Amino acid sequence: MEIVDSLVRKSFALVLAAACLAAMVAGCAPKKAAYQVPPGEVGVAVEASNFEFKPNLIQARAGEALVLKVKNVAGMGHNLTVLDPQGKSLANVDLPAGQTTDIHLPPLGAGTYPFYCDKPLHPSFGMKGEIRVGAP
């Protein structure tokens, strides 16, 4: 009987150790994005609500192509317009109410890229932000 008790205790200890090891490994594993982006692109989740974008500051590295996955949680349509540092439009995309839209931006050079909703008065109410692109 003593041998059986010893085997049960050792088996339990091994199972417990394996479970702890599995939990530690899972905690160290890299987190996958909530969505897939094409190879070579970096995904950024953005939320559009009434008169704000979250985040309103996006940091990137030069040479990265971005996919902005914009979820419009507002009950009204919005827009996302992205300008390059010289003021030329890179994207001008409507964001239907309650929907998610992917906006693909080409590889970006260093600089500041403003973005905003082009609906009347929306930028003045705070619906704007910028993408800051630093050295690679």
Image (tube, rainbow, N blue to C red):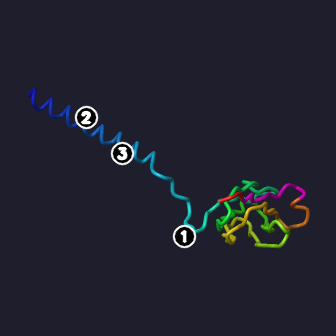
Is 130 within the magenta? yes
> Which residue is painted at 15% across and 30% down in the image?
6
User: Relative to 69, is 20 on the left or the right?
Assistant: left
Query: What is the x, y in percent for residue 136?
Result: 65, 60
Give the labeled residue for mark 3: 22
Foreground of the two, 64 or 82: 64
**Res 37 quadrant in image:** bottom right
Q: Label 1: how many residues lie within 10 Å, few (<14), some (14-19) or many (20+)?
A: few
> Which residue is painted at 81% across and 62% down in the image?
114
Task: Quadrant for the N terminus, please.
Answer: top left
**Residue bounds of the magenta highlight:** 124-133
Give the labeled residue for mark 1: 39
- Give whichever of discs 2 and 1 has the lower sequence position: 2
User: Is the residue under label 1 in contact with that under label 2 (CB below 8 Å)?
Assistant: no
- Give whichever of discs 1 and 3 has the lower sequence position: 3
Residue type marked 3: Ala
Find the distance from the CA under tag 1 to the CA under tag 3. Answer: 29 Å
